Amino acid sequence: MTSALAVLATTRRTLADAGVDSPQADARTLMCAVLGIEATQLPLVDHLTDVQESQLNEMVNHRIQGTPVQHITSTAHFRTVSVQVGPGVFIPRPETEALAGWAIDQVRTQPRRVVELCAGSGALSLAIHAESCPAAQWAVELSTKAFTYLEKNLVGTPIVPVLGDMSQALAELEGTIDLVVANPPYVPTTIRKTLTPEVLADPDLALFAGEDGYKVFPLVAHSAARLLAPGGVVGCEHGDGQERIVTTIFTEAGFTSLASHKDLTGRPRFITAMKPNMQ
């Protein structure tokens, strides 16, 4: 058996020497996964067994080879929730937590009927449910592989998973939804070669949106316009430098009260808009 602190330090150095971006955080995450504990419990662990060290070394090797730490542990954390992830589903990112926070604020003011488009793992829907009190929720996902994770993650919640194309899904709810949120694919295919293996571990369907990255935004805008009741609002994430064109797309779809919002790093990250009331 080896001292837990010594193993943690060695793991961090190994990851750092291999060029992993967040060696300290990844070392802690992997060790916690091996031990089956929360990070706050790490100081209470004296030693790792030989078997545990072997398991940790195997995980570290996968991480060095570019496997996302979330795929290694099968878990991703997002705000106050955790979701199961793996090959075939998009790993939720911290920048999307700003969109979640905006949506949660909308629901806290009054109960709302909420739809998430491009739901993936369902992390966004789960965070909204956990931190507010929606009147009802639906999560729409096109990919059958991602939908498998979505169903698992929504078990035990009132959120309804929906497999299908967002442009046609939930036809029975058209004009009745109060809030639509979406984190659609928005990466241009032209920059594929510049992306790291870790980023490319996400499925193409959830990552890329044509040569310019704008292919899916009109679908989100028109789907939101179809689903929302007059006065309903939509929040849609976008990539760096896409704010102006995405705003135009939603304006052309008939939305008003367009506003730009920044993520936790201070970069423009999502827009919000309102479906106008009928005159």
Image (cartoon, helix red, strand yellow):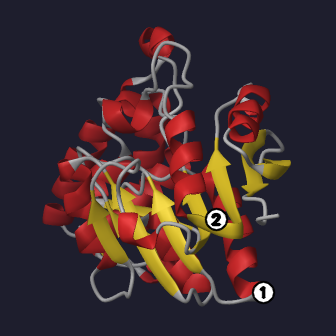
Q: Nearer the viewer, residue 75 or 219?
A: 219
Q: What residue is at 73 percent from the left and 89 percent from the top?
A: 110
The residue that label 2 is drawn on is 100
Direction from residue 211 to residue 273 in the image, left or right = right
- Name the quarter where the C terminus is drawn: bottom right
Q: In the rendered image, which quarter is residue 201 located in? A: top left
Image height check: is 33 above or below 80? above
**In the displayed image of the protein, which residue is found farthest to the left?**
51
Q: Quadrant of the N terminus?
A: bottom left
Query: Is any part of residue 77 visible from this angle?
Result: no
Residue depicted at x 60% and y 65%: 228
Badge 2 marks a residue whose secondary structure is helix
- Nearest to N terminus: mark 2 or mark 1: 2
Q: Alpha carbon of mark 2 to alpha carbon of mark 1: how far? A: 15 Å
Q: Give coordinates of residue 181: x percent, y percent.
A: 58, 59
Mark identifier at residue 231: none
Query: Within 10 angstroms of label 1, few (less than 14), some, or many (20 or more) residues?
Result: few
Q: Is residue 43 left or right of residue 61?
A: right
Seen from the viewer's position, the closer of residues 7 and 197 is 197
Eye-nearest disc, 2 or 1? 1
- How far across and how far down the image is residue 206, in percent? 39, 39
- Vertical placement of 44 versus 90: above or below? below
Residue plotted at (20% across, 69% down)? 49
- Residue tagged by mark 1? 109
Q: Secondary structure at mark 1?
A: helix
**Where's residue 5, x and y in %?**
46, 64
Q: Amino acid at mark 2?
A: Ala
Q: How many marks?
A: 2
Tell whether label 1 touches label 2 (CB within 8 Å): no
Would residue 266 be found to the left or right of residue 17 on screen? right
Whether residue 259 is visible, yes or no, is yes
